[in-house]
Image: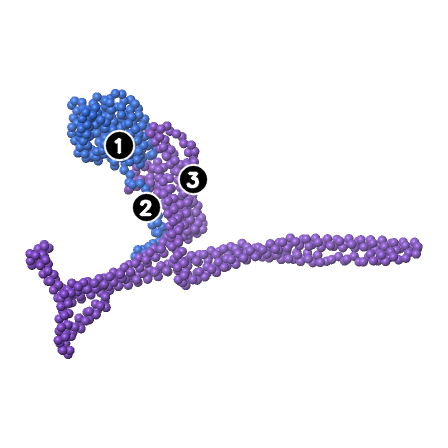
Chain colours: A blue, B purple
Amino acid sequence: MRLLNTLHSLTKRGRLAAASLAVTVLLAGCGEPPVQSRAVYMLMDISGTYTQQLDKAEKIMNYLLATLNTGDSLALARIDSASFNEEDIIVQATFDPRPSAANEQKRAFQKQMHDFIASVNGGSAYTDVTGGVIQAVDYLNETEAGEKYLLVFSDLAEELPEGHIRDFPIDVAGIQVVALNVTKLNQDNIDPRDYQHRLDAWQERVQDGGGEWQVLNDLERMDRVIAMN
Amino acid sequence: MFEQLLTVWSDSVAISAAIWLVLLVTVLYLGRQQAHQLFTTLGRAVYSAMRLAAFSVRGLENRLITRNRDVLIAQGRAQAEKTIEREFNRVSTLVERDLGAYPKLHRKIADAIEKIEADYQASTQAAPLPPAWSEVVETIAALPTNGDPAMNKVLNNIKDAIEESHQQTLKAYQKATLERHRHLSTMQPQWRTLQSSMDNVKKTLDGLEERTRTIDGQMQRYESIRKGEDASVNALTSSSITQFLIAGLVLVIATLGGLINFQLIALPMSEMVGATSTIGAMRTSDIAALVIILVEIAMGLFLLESLRITHLFPVIHSMDDRLRRRMIIITLTILTILATIEASLAYMRDLLALDRSALQQSLSGVAVVEAQFRWIPSIGQMVMGFILPFALAFVAIPLESFIHSLRTVMGMVMVGLLRTLRVALRLIGSLGRYACQIVINLYDLVIMVPLGVERLIKARRAEHRPEDDWDDEPALIESKRIRNQSTADV
């Protein structure tokens, strides 16, 4: 009764305001969930024979460019003999809030990436995956994105130059680390357990560092990692 | 704990349980009267409390029904008054438009009649018929001449004179006849004018008669509503529900239109305010798009209010005409500007979609294809962007109906809820009362063995006792009373 009295006592203007509010809530409810920016850092192995896989890496990057939206960040870096270096970041961009400007940035990004991949000749002597990962973590944390992804496009076989120290825990808290296209090496064919040990060691390292680990060898399933918006 | 209690009398569970049962039955038998009183009182208390609550709810329900009826009658009366007023306005317009020119029409008819009469009078003035000259000529011709030349000459002269006179008379007659015909032919358009004028008068009077009949019907309806007759209230209720459903349906359609509108301008809005900033859980660009849509709806409300199509804002409704006209111009201008903005945003959306599509094609390694007839969706989106704000502006009409009918429908829903509550309360009261009766009967079932023994002892004592020596009469009477009451309650 009190509710009814309240309803009756509402002025016409009050009822109108309530109706407007309801329409707003209804329209707002039909919108998208709260927006979280995303940051993706891709490490690309350019050592030895892995350079033959770079066309796949380009496809992945194209997929990411098509998927990421305004406000998201994307970076492409190489894994070479000493990867803990800003100079190894080939191209990086945080997309402009305006969609048209973001599209221009994506075109520029694609061009730079394409030019780099075309220019890769031969490979690095060593493979410093850990150094690249640490560099990536720094970049991803700086973006302060809601979702952080580190894509490692490598066979995960680490070979360090003499004197480089990498056998320490890495802090990848809040980062989803995805190993892409982890190819089998010749020695893996001799003893397949090596391959599994390599994957297990990286998984343990990432999970101990507070990150999430995932392996994706079928690149057609990239949408499982980053959903298309 | 339970097992310990169970085996407190004996190690054998069965024996111990039997002892417990005996003890329990004994205790229950000893406390039978008190237990019966407790359950009976409890049942009555629940029943009375629920009945009282149901009675209160009934009072509330009646008050609400009366209030709903008053509201409905007041709304119906206002509506009927408006309808009657409109009908009177129509009659007034009809009278002003058609019967206002009646004196002129009357003069026209009178003139036409006068002319017809004058023509008629003129046509009745017949020329004299030529006399029977021929007979005279023949008689003169037949006269014997006797060869007298003078006589012949005289007769011939007479004959010529007579014939000439005859010819002149005949000509005069023919001329007069022609004149009459001319008068009669000039009467024809006057008749037609008269006929047309009379038809117009008839049409006007028929229209008036029809309006009068409508007003009569409306007056009867108004009278019925004023008296608060059930038939009128039922008709108003039914009308209100229909209005509620129809208005609700239109509002749903308008909401869908609003959503389409939102989708049309949300993306290009991000080009203006950026796509990354958020307010709460929503993007600022989405909020900006929503605000534009809501402002359009608000402008639509003000426009229709200023046009006196809706009556949601008494302030606007009571404005003087000059101010109201200004408000119409202002709201219409703002609405048009917003519609133009939306059209341009829709075009921008199309451009962005095109750019995005080109980028996707480029990223997937496909050559960018220039789509044919791309201008068709572009223009379609622009037109939609321009029209939707005006379409949304009309949401004020169903909104007003919805708000007005919501009052009645909410009242009915509340009455329904109160009625359900009342029935539930009565049901709970009755169930509580009968549940207590069932508990009393179950109680007696548990202690049926000692009760049976008691009955046997009492029966035997009654057999051996003299009829006048009934010491235990009060106890028996009490026992009978309790039993009778139990039976009556069941």
* Callout 3: chain: B
User: The C terminus of chain A lies in which quarter of the figure?
Assistant: top left
Q: Nearer the viewer, residue A170 or A93?
A: A170
Query: Where does residue B440 sit, x and y in percent of width and height?
Result: 19, 64
Residue drawn at (52%, 55%) of the image: B94
Query: Residue furthest toward the top?
Result: A122
Query: Where does residue B258 sit, x and y in percent of width and height?
Result: 37, 44
- Residue A148 shows in the view: yes
The disc at residue A25 is 2
* Residue to which mark 3 is pinned: B383
Q: Nearer the viewer, mark 1 or mark 2?
A: 1
In which image quadrant can residue A153 be found?
A: top left
At mark 1, the secondary structure is strand
Query: Where does residue A10 sit, x and y in percent of width and height?
Result: 34, 54
At mark 3, the secondary structure is helix
The disc at residue A171 is none
* Residue to which mark 1 is pinned: A40
Q: Is label 1 in contact with label 2 (beta carbons under 8 Å)?
A: no
Q: Could you give the CA–CA distance between mark 3 and mark 1, rounded to whole angstroms?
A: 40 Å
Exactly how many numbered labels are in the figure?
3
Label 2 is placed on what type of residue?
Val
Label 3 is placed on what type of residue?
Val
